[in-house]
Image (cartoon, rainbow, N blue to C red):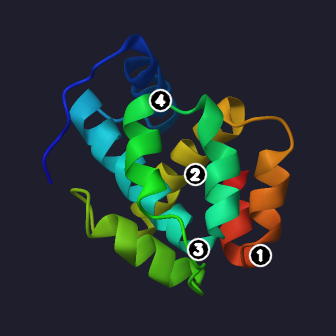
Amino acid sequence: MDITPWNGTTMRSFVEDVQGATKLDSADEAERLTRATLGTLAEGISGGQVDDLMPELPEELRRELSGRSGQARSLDKTSFLDRVSGEITTTDLETTEDLVRGVLRTLRTWAPEGQIDDTVDQLPRSISEMFG
């Protein structure tokens, strides 16, 4: 996966927040994880909900996620984590889950008020619990 150069401080800030939440060693790893997690999340919720999450996200993520909005796919926790682990350097699902939790906690702080609750309502409980 190609890592997009940061075009603004907003993307840098988001990735730094993810890196802090996950304790990853590099910003590139944190960005890969962020894109994999949010891309997979976007597949599991409605296109309208993806649009509702996007206003406060960095422009780079908004562009990427806007192409994924559409009909929600049914995902269980294992499928969700498998998809993310396929995009990052670890394949251990326990480690992947810890990392995904860090991204979702970061998303919670960046998302417009009330939108995380609306997102969680569209997900199976096993995935929604990862929002912490």
Residue 26 position within the rendered picture, expressed as x and y whole percent measured from the top left? 24, 30
Mark nearest the camera among 1 and 4 is 4
Residue corresponding to mark 1: 125
Number of dots carrying numbers: 4
Q: Which residue is mark 4?
A: 58
Viewer-closest of 49 and 107 = 49
How far, Cα to Cα, is label 1 from label 3? 12 Å
Tell me the amino acid under the disc marked 3.
Gly
Q: Observer-nearest residue: 73 or 15?
A: 73
Which numbered mark, 3 or 2, is in the foreground of this view? 3
Nearer to us of marks 1 and 3 is: 3
The residue labelled by disc 3 is 44
Could you tell whether 78 is left or right of 95 in the image? right
Q: 123 or 62, which lies in front? A: 62
- Mark 3 vs mark 2: which is more N-terminal? 3
Residue drawn 84% across the image and 54% down it: 117
| Mark 2, other Cα within 10 Å: few <14 / some 14–19 / many ≥20 | many
Q: Position of residue 24 (x, y in %)?
A: 34, 36
Rounded to the nearest angstrom, the CA distance separating label 2 from label 1 is 14 Å
Q: Is residue 41 left or right of residue 105?
A: left
Q: Is residue 26 shown to the viewer in this render? A: no
**Residue 60 in which image quadrant:** top left
Q: Amino acid at mark 1?
A: Arg
**Callout 3: SS:** helix
Neighbor class of circle 3 (other Cα within 10 Å; few <14, some 14-19, many 20+) is many
Which residue type does callout 4 highlight? Answer: Pro
Element marked by disc 1: helix
